[in-house]
Amino acid sequence: EIIVSFLIACALWYSVVVGEAEIQEKVVTIPVEYIRTPKDLALAGETPSAVKVHLVGPKSSLINLDDFRVKIDLSKATPGKQRVTITASHINLAKKVKLVDAQPSSLTLELVQIVQKEFTVKPQWVGKLQPSLRIVTVSINPAKIKALVRSDSSNIKNLVLMTTPIYLENIKASTTIYSKIVAPPRIQPADEKWPDVEVLIKVDRKRSSGAAN
């Protein structure tokens, strides 16, 4: 049994040594990650999500490539277009693995400024009020909310924040409804999350056409 165990150990050792010594080439497609983007900047347009890389290294180091990533650090980025040349420093390569080539060899990125603006909050009405009722006033608190939006967004002045749906058929009398904010993807909260919104709806009954003046 001792001899058998020794032979197995020798076989394992030999396979490891051979695996380390055998050089292999692989061409694989790996995802691109954009990290440390400054809070006041955002990537614009289409950004490459994957890069095909040609790698050379020990066979044992090229078995599992699922964890390989091209990581683009944007911590020092500035607004505008910039080109990033893909190098080995962008990839978490295993020991003794070398990058021979990358396709594309460089990425052209565009970053735009994130600006803070104040947006009006509007109620999102759904359905119809009972025929016998009419809305007298609607008060929203807060009526305006500061939010972040990309500077290249079109019609920024016309963008508004909406409440979650308010169903008019459910309103039987003056009431206060607490809603959430519904915003387009390009508008993000200035704080960690959107504040709750209080919608005060004052209604009264319509006078009949035959009522005395």
Image (cartoon, grey):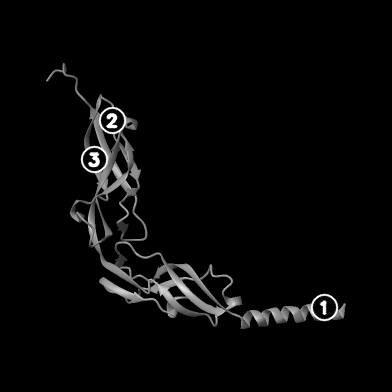
- Disc 3 to disc 1, how far (Cα)? 84 Å
Quadrant location of the C terminus in the rendered image: top left
Q: Is residue 189 visible?
A: yes
Against 130, is 192 above or below? below
Residue at x-position 84% and y-position 78%: 4
Of residues 23 and 160, the one nearer the viewer is: 23
User: Residue at label 1?
Assistant: 5
Which quadrant would residue 80 be assigned to in this image? Answer: bottom left
Label annotation for residue 138: 3
Task: Mark 1 vs mark 2: give the one in front.
Answer: 1
Which of the two residues, 14 or 116, is positioned nearer the viewer here?
14
Separation of residues labelled 1 and 2 (CA atoms)? 83 Å
Q: Position of residue 95 (x, y in %)?
A: 55, 81
Q: Earlier in the sequence, mark 3 or mark 1?
A: 1
- Mark 1 packing: few (<14 Cα in 10 Å), some, or many (20+)? few
Q: Position of residue 78 (x, y in %)?
A: 27, 74
Query: For the residue labelled by badge 1, is the local secondary structure a helix, a strand or a loop?
Result: helix
Front-most of residues 174 and 12: 12
Q: To which residue does mark 2 refer?
A: 128
